[in-house]
Amino acid sequence: MNVTEAVLSRASARAYLDQPVEPELLREILAAALRAPSGGNLQPWHVHVLTGAAKQNFSQRILDSFSNNPMGESPDPKMYPEPLPSPYKERRAVCGTMLYDALAIPKEDKQARIVQALKNYEFFGAPVGLIFTMPSYMVEAQAIDMGILMQSIMLLAKDRGLDTCPQVIWRMWPQTIRSALDIGDAQHVMGGMCLGYADTASPVANLGVPRDSLDALVSFHGD
Ligand SMILES: Cc1cc2nc3c(=O)[nH]c(=O)nc-3n(C[C@H](O)[C@H](O)[C@H](O)COP(=O)(O)O)c2cc1C
């Protein structure tokens, strides 16, 4: 698989096979991804890898926090602007609609939607969960670095027959996550990621979420 194929075939997988990822393969992906560039070569990231019982316990901690406080904790950096204006609001809605349509969950069935959303906290059944943190004194520019690292992991995984789903939703639980990972208050939770072998038979293995056109999103200045 070349880079173009990896970029074009990567999709957020929200269903995984019960098949572990070989530890050596995981280390190989992460080691290669850590070659990602960062402004000033700060390498501001830290990746927490969760597997097996540690992953299960971590998910349970979050689900317990959700039961006590469904609105979530105060996120470190916010997840989205509030309110979210057009056209971003509509784009977000398309992705949500495609997800619930694929699962035949109607709009009125709030309970089924919550059950589906909670699957985020079990990394959608993936055998590997990643949590990304960085020191709380970092600024917006370092969030770019983190995004580059995350995409590097996603493409390297794709190249090895694995799939992923980046997850901003973990930002809703910074206090619980810091406590569960024992990392103290000086780290911001930037997000997470599922990683594993996608269950390609599932309608949510690849939703085929569309993108706006090149002309809508790119301005060429010059000849
Ligand atoms: C930084 C980031 C955070 C995301 N957070 C979540 C999330 O919390 N839960 C989820 O199901 N999908 C999440 N997604 C997946 C997006 O919904 C998805 O990338 C988008 O709809 C495009 O679809 P595709 O990845 O299949 O191409 C996230 C994606 C990114 C890049």
Image (spheres, rainbow, N blue to C red):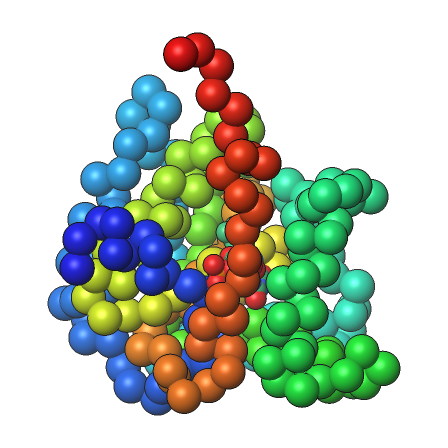
> Residue shown at 19%/66% (left/top)?
160
Query: If the image is split into quadrants, where does the N terminus sit?
Result: bottom left
Q: Is residue 11 above or below residue 171?
A: below
Farthest-out residue, top: 222
> Residue shown at 38%/82% (left/top)?
200
Image location of residue 55, percent across then percent down: 43, 75
Q: Please indicate whether residue 143 sits to the left or right of residue 78 in the image.
A: left
Residue 51 makes an appearance in the image: no
Query: If the image is split into quadrants, where does the C terminus sit?
Result: top left
In which image quadrant can residue 131 be found? Answer: bottom left
Q: Please indicate whether residue 104 sits to the left or right of residue 16 in the image.
A: right
Image location of residue 127, percent across then percent down: 36, 78
Q: Is residue 56 above or below residue 221?
A: below
Q: Please indicate whether residue 211 sits to the left or right of residue 163 in the image.
A: right
> Residue shown at 45%/72% (left/top)?
206
Residue 148 makes an appearance in the image: yes
Closer to the camera in the image, 29 or 154: 154
Closer to the camera in the image, 129 or 181: 129
> Residue shown at 72%/43% (left/top)?
87
Closer to the camera in the image, 110 or 102: 102
Q: Is residue 17 above or below residue 39?
A: below
Farthest-out residue, right: 108
Q: Is residue 96 above or below residue 34?
A: below
Count of number-bearing discs: 0
